[in-house]
Amino acid sequence: MKLAIVDYGAGNLRSVVKAFDFIGQDCVITSSKDVINSCAGVVLPGVGAFREAANKLKAAGLWDHLKAEAKKGKALFGICLGMQLLFDGSTEFGYSEGLGLIEGSVDGIDTGGKPLKIPHIGWNTLLFNKKTALFEGMDYGTYVYFVHSFSAKTSDENVTAFTDYGVKTVASAEKKNVLGTQFHPEKSGEEGLKILRNFCNMVKHDNFTCN
């Protein structure tokens, strides 16, 4: 089984690939539709601005292709900005359309009026809303690593975990074969590696049950 790590000029690819290599998972960095087609699952990393990343995916000819592959049932895992792109759109620098694979929007972090720094950078807890296969073997309150200024707003039925940053903030979301984490599992130590292993097992066994 091989995973495609999408290279569209906006991803934090090196650390993602190193993490998958560490757990023994075969993966390939690619911007090729044919390679993506040949892989069992797709990982969409990303750092930076939503609109720029969306434009880069479109320029690479991958925007509609990723949507089509996901709608056919292929596993698609977005990390950080990659997760944000899974939603309907973002208000960062004006409204930009997202992939529309999970209902919801991406807006500036709301800290509930508390004097917390934006961007949110550092370790924070996972507060599970639904315990799905992605978090198999993990405890409520596990710490993971975040770097973001915007966060998703979506129905609770799509949210698998929150974190507390002044208010409940979406940390992860899933809809069938489409998954995302706002935090960086590849930078979250052994617990993050556990998430990546769980994702690989979900792909291998076609174990997608959320929604």
Image (tube, helix red, strand yellow):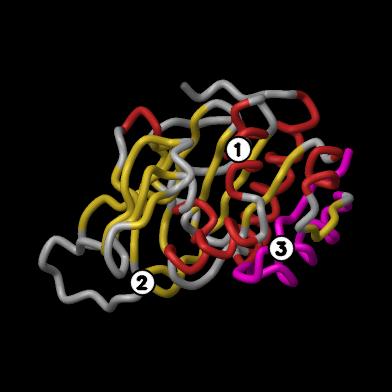
Residue furthest toward the left? 113
Residue at mark 2: 120
Circle nearer the viewer, 3 or 1: 3
Q: Residue at x 52, y 64 (%)?
A: 53
x 64%, y 47%: residue: 195
* Mark 2 or mark 3, earlier in chain: 3
In the figure, is residue 154 to the left or right of 84?
Answer: left
Q: Give the residue type that dot 2 points to.
A: His
The magenta stretch spans which residues? Answer: 1-25
- Label 2 SS: strand
Give the mark nearer the N terminus: 1 vs 2: 2
Q: Tell me: 15 left or right of 137.
A: right
Q: Residues within 10 Å of mark 1 (few under 14, many from 20)?
A: many
Circles 2 and 3: CB distance less than 8 Å? no
- The reply, left or right, for residue 105 in relation to residue 166 is right
The residue at which mark 1 appears reads as 134
Could you tell me which quadrant the N terminus lies in?
top right
Q: Give the distance between the C-alpha atoms of the residues marked 3 and 1, in whole angstroms.
A: 23 Å
> Which amino acid lies under the numbered mark 1 shown in the image of this protein?
Leu
Give coordinates of residue 144: x percent, y percent: 51, 60
Q: Is residue 138 magenta?
A: no
Q: Amino acid at mark 3?
A: Asp
